[in-house]
Amino acid sequence: MSKAGKGGSDKLQQKSPAEFFAENKNIAGFDNPGKCLYTTVRELVENALDSAESISVLPLVEITIEEVSRARLNTLRGLGDHARVDEQLYHDYESEDARKKRLAKEAKEKQRLEKLAASKGEAAAAAAAADAARKAADGKKAGPARGTLFYKVTVKDNGCGMSHADIPNMLGRVLSGTKYGVKQTRGKFGLGAKMALIWSKMTTGLPFSISSALRKQDFRSQYELDIDIHKNAPNVHSAAKLPNADGWHGACLSLTIEGNWSSYRAKLLKYLRQIAVITPYAQFSFQYIAEDPKSSLKLTFRRRTDVMPPPPKITKHHPSSVDLELVKRLITETKATSLSAFLTREFDQVSKALSGRLIGELRSGGVNASTDPKQLSSQQVVRLHQLLHEVRFADPSGSHLSPAGEYNLRLGVMKELQPELIATHAGDVRVFEGHAFIVEAAVSLGGRELRPGINVYRFANRIPLLFEGGSDVITRTATKRINWGSYKINQSSDRVGVFVSIVSTKIPFKGAGKEYIGDDVEEMVSAVKAAIQQCCAQLRVRGSRWNSCLIAGSSWGNVEEMVGAVKATIQQCCVQLREMVVAVKAAIQQCCAQLRVSRSLRHHCLNARSVWGCVEMVSAVKAAIQQCCAQLRVKIAKALALREQQQRRRNLTKYIPDAAGAIFTVLAAMAGSDPRGPKRRRLQDSSNLLQQVARKEVVQAMLEKKLAEHVERIDTDMALEFQVAQGLAGGAAKQQLWLAPLCDKTHYGAELHANACVVRLLH
Ligand SMILES: Nc1ncnc2c1ncn2[C@@H]1O[C@H](COP(=O)(O)OP(=O)(O)OP(=O)(O)O)[C@@H](O)[C@H]1O
């Protein structure tokens, strides 16, 4: 008989969602103090971006992390200083034995440093000493979690703000939010900010401080609240409406948590850099305020463009994506009073005609077009759900999605990493389980902060993903499914940046922490692969042009001059360019709309929604990556040619001193020999070189100089020949530029001429 049967301790219990997540914090990315600090910042920053973008305002996000000492925290919590009564109780108590061991260890270390200074010099010893001091300081810190401290995290934005009445529920009740619809948003679960609050409650006990104002609201809401974890309900400490004289709108959220800046500093800064890459239209100011001002840090990731992707739109459920429970919920919530209206109103891709045909299929079950959906029996609902999964519907159009756009992705990568070469590609709209998704990619070569090899940058719904990359669809595709060699990219020695951004109304994340996308969705695999391949293909072409350009100039100075001239010319013409870009954008949008329609039709024909759907995603990922690689291959071929040429020149230059020395020795010997000798006579016939050598008018250094000039000339001639061979001598080295529109007039000049280049405006 079980204990429960005996009325023992196995008592039925229930947990609130807040309790569940408090006990399983790691599910939401709150694993340890360092990760908690990281995830708190991340959740608040992503809310700030969602909020500003929802009202089409260029985001301005201010992030502050301030160290809070234990003494200050105690003051904030109303605790006075307390004198220890029994030192031995504490973590940092050092017993006599431990003290002796430490002193012995320190003496040994001192000896080692003295030896090091004697053998390798003072600098190496000083570095080792600093390292040892740091380790010792860490070792002395009390408690199991070394480096752990308390931090006040504040994130302020210029977004839509929250209504006064909604704030307690939005920020004090787990699983409540405004992002549950079928819409592409960074947030989804209604959990992130509350997890930060739960962590703050568990570690410092201090409440959430919230200040917020809606647009055109004459007051600011000011709240102090925390969460009743047991009831999963907000616990409001204070609420006030303060004057909003300057008309500010947005939110400023602040909480004090335990964290570990030193172990997650690098990750946090990496996250900020990557979010700046994928949102170059946002400005991020970051400030770390340390107790010791020397360790404080201030960074600004500047806005580089005013072009924001159009905000994502809410869309209807695609019939093939709904489960039985969702169908029941839609029936309960719908305002439609007939089955026909219900189908067209609640589902994407169901026209009036199609709803009539669907109802025809259900007629045998006793329903017709005017049946009230709320009157359907449970069998009829089950049949309807079955039918929705059996019928082939057109794919979702994807027009409700908001990808970063090739322009923004390219700009972001260039601004933050300054690569030598870059190619971008935006894939078509594809479909996975009835949800549209788009994959965009950039592949770069060189630039700052990249290690030799494939450096993968992952983004999902424009969030950088920094953890658990090994199993992610993007990492696995970039490292395992692309044949980099075929694009002349050396996978282990070239510094390759692979940036892939996936946007969708449903990202198949593994876990609520939103850290990585599973590699088991064939559709995603194929779309990611295709995007990277597209970029590589572009790089191959552009690399050749760029290298030809470098070869044509005899030095980097010339290239710089050319860049300066291009810049000046572009500046003169930017008014015309702005107008052009407006027109280009309109044209592209039209084309995209047409492409989406035709693509969607093609999918409709191909996609039997089972095996074929998966194959489609795999091949799309593959094709995108391959396209990128193909472009890269041409660039790299040209880079290799350039490298060979430089090598040849280096080799020739290397032998100039020896060759000049040998020639001069022979000449000097001949100049001093019998003038009637046969060799001397032959030379005198054509030149008075020997006399010049004898008179010291020709010396070895002159010979070296002449030889160097000759090598230089030959090299330039060969470079020109190379250019001609590439078909560039008669035309111009072309480089595409993307320019942001600032006004909507449309008047373009034909060509803008400068000394070093011509800018041609196309649309
Ligand atoms: N800075 C903000 N400005 C405006 N509204 C906000 C802001 N921060 C949070 N909110 C509102 O509070 C809700 C809850 O936020 P929370 O971070 O808990 O979850 P979420 O962002 O909806 O989803 P996820 O858990 O996936 O991040 C959001 O849906 C949003 O409506």
Image (spheres, rainbow, N blue to C red):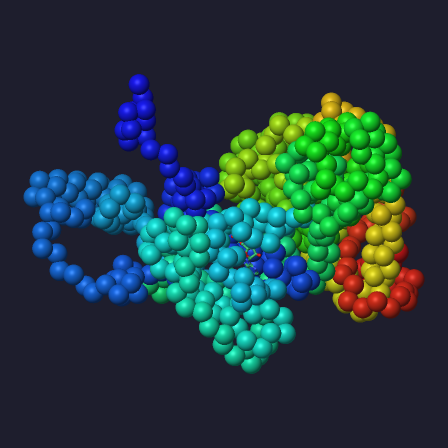
The image quadrant where one finds the N terminus is: top left
Q: Residue at x 89, y 66 (%)?
A: 746
**In the depicted view, which residue is nearer to us: 519 or 572?**
519
Is residue 373 shown to the viewer in this render? yes
**In the depicted view, which residue is nearer to us: 487 or 310?**
310
Q: Which residue is drawn at 56% across and 59% down?
A: 48
Rendering quarter of residue 721: top right
Rendering quarter of residue 381: top right
Position of residue 108 in the picture relative to residue 314 (left or right): left
Extreme residue in the left direction: 96
**In the depicted view, which residue is nearer to us: 645 or 663?**
645
Q: Residue at x 58, y 37 (%)?
A: 509
Q: Quadrant of ligand 1?
A: bottom right
Q: Residue at x 85, y 42 (%)?
A: 351
Q: Give x and y (percent) for residue 687.
A: 78, 45
**In the depicted view, which residue is nearer to us: 18 or 110?**
18
| Figure check: 470 above or below 554 | above
The image quadrant where one finds the C terminus is: bottom right
Rendering quarter of residue 477: top right
| Figure check: 214 above or below 148 | below
Q: Give x and y (percent) for residue 279.
A: 63, 55
